[in-house]
Amino acid sequence: MSETETKIKPSFINRELSWLQFNTRVVELAYDESLPLLERLKFLAISASNLDEFFMVRVGSLKLTTSNVPDPSGMTPTQQLAAIRDKVIEMNLLQDRCLVEHLEPALAQAGLVRLSPNDLNDRQREFVINYFREEVKSVISPTAITEDRPMTALQGAKLCLCIRLKAHQQSPFFKGEGTTEKQTEFFSLISVPSILHRMVFVPSDRGQAFILLEDVIGMALRDLFANEEIVEWTTLRVTRNADFALDDDAEDFFSEMEQFLELRAKSKCIRMRVAQNTSQEMVTFLGKIFKLQPDDVYVANAPLDHSAWMTLVNHPQFAELRDAHWSQSPSSEFLEGESMFDAIAERDRVLIHPYHSFDPVVEFLRQAVADPNVIAIKQTLYRTSRYSKIVSLLAEASRNGKFVTAVVELKARFDEARNMDWAEVLEKAGVEVIYGVVGFKVHAKFCIVVRREKSGICRYVHIGTGNYNENTATLYGDISLFTADPQIGLDAIHVMNAITGLSVPQNLGKLAMAPINLRDTILQLIEVEKINAGDQLPGEILLKLNSLVDPKMIEALYEASQKGVKVKINVRGICCLRPGVPGLSDNIQVVSILDRFLEHSRIIYFRHGGDQKVFISSADWMGRNLDRRIEILAPIDDPICRQQLLEVLEAYFSDNTNAWEILPDGTHRRLKPGENPSFRSQQQLSELFREQYELSVNPRTTVFKPILGEA
């Protein structure tokens, strides 16, 4: 047996280790010297934020499980936790080294300098102390803690100072004459207030200089503890579990959700990062206070919480350290001032975000609100923006007398509170609000506008791969489909009625819906490719997904590969499939693209014997999406729209600049142009759609007629 064959058993990559490989790719971008400096800092901040959520959700779940059953990769939860810790230690070292040894020196050279307390001159030191006394001192609240008096309300992901003190004789912690020095010691915790800026800019004769807020507090501890001896102080940050069950069958689900959010804020601690200079005595004490095991403690070699550096990315005085602006193009599919309903009735339309502006999605609703012929609007809402135009328009439509139904998914993780607020706004406006479905998350993104026309009732439908969020639509790669197809309109109504009526949907003609038939629909399409390949017809599958985890779907792709079907997969994050393994997945290639925009769209292509099939979907190929969420798979039937998406797929699979090839063992290597011209898919798509728009508004009317000779 060859070394390669040994590595393929079992045939799946562990989900958690695959995700950590993805986040390593994000860290690698922070090291990429071809990128502008603040863009590199942005990727470092993103990698830290990603890792926080990974611990809150995935590690939290593993720590709470009582099962020791192996996952599809053959690893038990205990083995996974050990492997995760090893990889996270390695990743933390990469992150810390990137900041301290690469980014900070480069930032300093560019005129953006972080100062330590020892770096301050007299003028800066005076400024910092005054800032503390005027701005900080009244905000912070030192809290004394002992093993008998633990501080349990510390929020997760909160940066803190822990101070080790010796009690004064008049202190309540002083235990009388004859006590040992250790017995007179106590600890105090200070949360670094997020309402204040983490980076405190100080006067500087050259460039911009700042000191971290925790260092400001550390410099002024004597102002807080005038009568105690400060033995040591350090910084720490704890992460709490955010993955626990919610009773979504409760009589008052809204109240249940409020209690759920309160519990999350005080849930079990699963990780603590501490500064490198922290004494073992303090680490041991904090471990007892937060009920942590030694393996839950990670030592930092740089300032804690790299995600906070995102505040510097948009610093107004350093535009030259960021990417050049790529402007969004209005879509040539919709002309300014025209009726969107007329345009959609003529043929289906597709938008490719963020290259195409999200404005037509908002305008679709705006026109529906103003149109007296529109009698109803039905929409799902999973994640929305803080100041959502979409929600405001739905409320306005209801106040205008239209029948409006909104399915607001309260179980959208980390957006629960915002969705609860929007649900109340909509209810006050008279909108019929549904709080999702018992046992499932409504992850499908679609909007139905019901319009009375001369020919009868017409249904105009928007289906998206991304959220109805105007802000993230400028940063996320997603697809919007607008259609007046009667069957899709009827299917969408059936899906909505199934959600609101808690019923099984009627037979769907064109749409597929999870958990009803989406999985089977895709498996049947893969089966067709296998059959065609067996009949000597070219078989081909192209997939663009965020995550590929589900064992049944992966097995189907393995079988297709073994029949000779060519499979190309673009997966942003987790990929549990092992590509390029002899005898298993010879015909499967997997790439991952990380660039300026977050790749979020799901596009699926099947050659289908020459009758090409293209679909978009809200669903990744994960068990939760296919079995425990309500999702939609929509066909792209219009030839023009289909061709647009094929061009998008071709661009992604041609990228040799910001693409990583996933290797059989789950690791990756970054692709390089080599002898080929450099091709950056996101940049090429941005230019392509801008050129298409410019041609649509400024058509080249001059036609050159060739002079033909006689035959």
Image (cartoon, grey):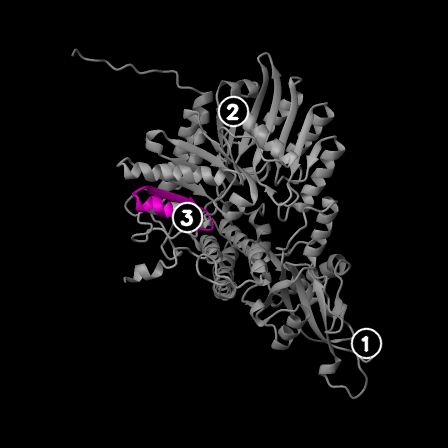
Query: 318 or 282, which lies in front?
Result: 282
The residue singled out by tag 2 in the image is 487
| Circle nearer the N terminus (1, 2) | 1
Residue 690, x across and y down, in percent = 45, 30
Q: Quadrant of the C terminus?
A: top left
Q: Earlier in the sequence, mark 3 or mark 2?
A: 2
**The residue stretch that appears in magenta:** 557-575
Identity of the residue drawn at 40% across and 56% down: 666
In this figure, which residue is indicated by the disc labeled 3? Answer: 554
Residue sitting at the far right: 170
User: Does the segment drawn in magenta span residue 169?
Assistant: no
Is 703 located above or below residue 300 in the figure? above
Q: Amino acid at mark 3?
A: Ile
Q: Tell me: residue 148, above or below residue 660.
A: below
For marks 1 and 3, give the one nearer the viewer: 3
Q: Is residue 5 above or below residue 351?
A: below
Q: Residue at x 62, y 69 (%)?
A: 292
Choose between 544 and 276: the one closer to the eye: 544
Q: Which mark is residue 171?
A: 1
In the rendered image, residue 270, in percent from the top left (x then y), is placed at 61, 63
Q: Residues within 10 Å of mark 1 (few under 14, many from 20)?
A: few
Q: Which quadrant: the N terminus?
A: bottom left
* SS state under label 3: helix
Could you tell me the amino acid type at mark 2? Gln
Q: Nearer the viewer, residue 274 or 345?
A: 345
| Residue found at the far bottom of this picture | 178
